[in-house]
Amino acid sequence: MLKTTRDMILPTAITGSYPRPLWYEASLQGRSFKMAMGDSLFREQYQDAVAAIINAQEAAGLDIVTDGDSRFDLAVGGKSWFFYPIERLGGIEGHRSTSQGWMARHDIRPGKILWEVQEAYQPAIVKRKLTRGPLEYAALWQIAQRLSDKPVKFGAICAPALASMLWNAYYPDDHAMVLDLCDIMNAELRELAAAGCPVIQVEEPRQHGLTTRPDCSEAELEFQTRAFNRQLEGVGAEIWVHTCWGNPNQQRVYWEVPSYERALPYLLQLDADVITFECASNGGRDLPLFAKFKTDKKIGIGVVNHCNTVVEPAEHVADLIKKALQYIPPDTPHAWGNAGPAAARMLWVWGGADPFGDATYLQGEPPRTSG
């Protein structure tokens, strides 16, 4: 349900993740967040880091801010994006050295960034029925929100993507494991919304990644869509879905940025109010696709690329927004189905670091972004 961005035109936000201050050295290391907040060193560093990150976003004039994913440990290639929840699930025991399919799908070998990522991640093994542990999303959001008068968005990995870093040694098939993960995430997201979180961002549905594979079937895309929506049932907040092509440690997973074309019809079936797309990395090449599909969802485009270490000139960003407006009208409810003016297909622009990895930014400049 559109709440926060209902009447906003071209609101701005970062994707979610943000570079750690160098003095923020403490980590959760698998601990419960609430328990760790009883550690005076962690508490001071964590709260100071979140305050500094929110202040930087406010100073940059962003409309919606985040806590910078400050719960994540200082780990290789954004490992905590997967492992913050994995370390807090019941039913997991031990680990394997490689994840399912990554080695074959991405031709991983020494010299590629995903080799380093794969070596560091150590995927977990599911030995028993998965159960919900102390993810504590509501507590994390509450600390950030009390530091800002602006709406604070909370983002987290989706259940289907989380399954890609698990080895199934219990369930009859991976689909059954994914559905249990969806139910766990649904309970967590419902609690987060009930605590008052205005915007929940669910990150990286698998549809667009799967369509880069020659063995991707329509049946699998349909299952992924149903599963993703299952975790959103009854979540009473404005829901955003973030998509990108993965940029761990500012390195592209794909040399040639793929297209959303095949995945887009499935992505538009997700039960979300806003869907974001990586656009800066390919100069908005996929933007014409949005003229082909009717939707009442808001579309977010990435306008700054954190894989590029040169800060984009304002004119460059403006040109990409102008290009998007050729295909995504800012307010055309009658042209896009039965949506009323409040749900019009208004363009929404975001920036920020990729939740999948790290990012850097120049002192005094806005944060970098995955899209």
Image: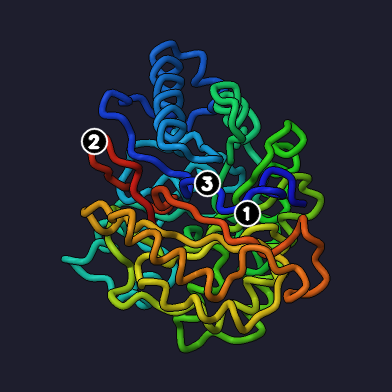
Q: Earlier in the sequence, mark 3 or mark 1?
A: 3
Whether 152 is drawn above or below 83: the answer is: above
Q: Earlier in the sequence, mark 1 or mark 2?
A: 1
Relative to 83, 265 lies left or right: right
Image coords of residue 179 (percent x, y): 70, 61
The answer to which of 186 and 195 lies nearer the viewer is 195
Q: Secondary structure at mark 1?
A: strand
Image coords of residue 99 (percent x, y): 41, 63
Residue lying furthest left: 111
The answer to which of 278 and 206 lies nearer the viewer is 278
> Which kind of residue does numbered mark 2 sit on?
Gln
Asked whether disc 3 touches disc 2, contact meaning CB atoms under 8 Å apart, the reply is no
Residue 274: image quadrant is bottom right
The answer to which of 72 and 173 lies nearer the viewer is 72
Q: Secondary structure at mark 2?
A: loop
Whether 17 is drawn above or below 270: the answer is: above
> Which kind of residue does numbered mark 1 sit on?
Trp
Which residue carries the number 1 mark? 240
Which residue carries the number 2 mark? 363
Cα distance between the residues tagged 3 and 1 = 22 Å
Tell me the residue at 55%/47% (across/down). 156
Relative to 35, 306 lies left or right: left
Which residue carries the number 3 mark? 86
Tell me the residue at 44%/33% (across/down). 70
Tag 3: Cα neighbours inside 10 Å, few (<14), some, or many (≥20)?
many
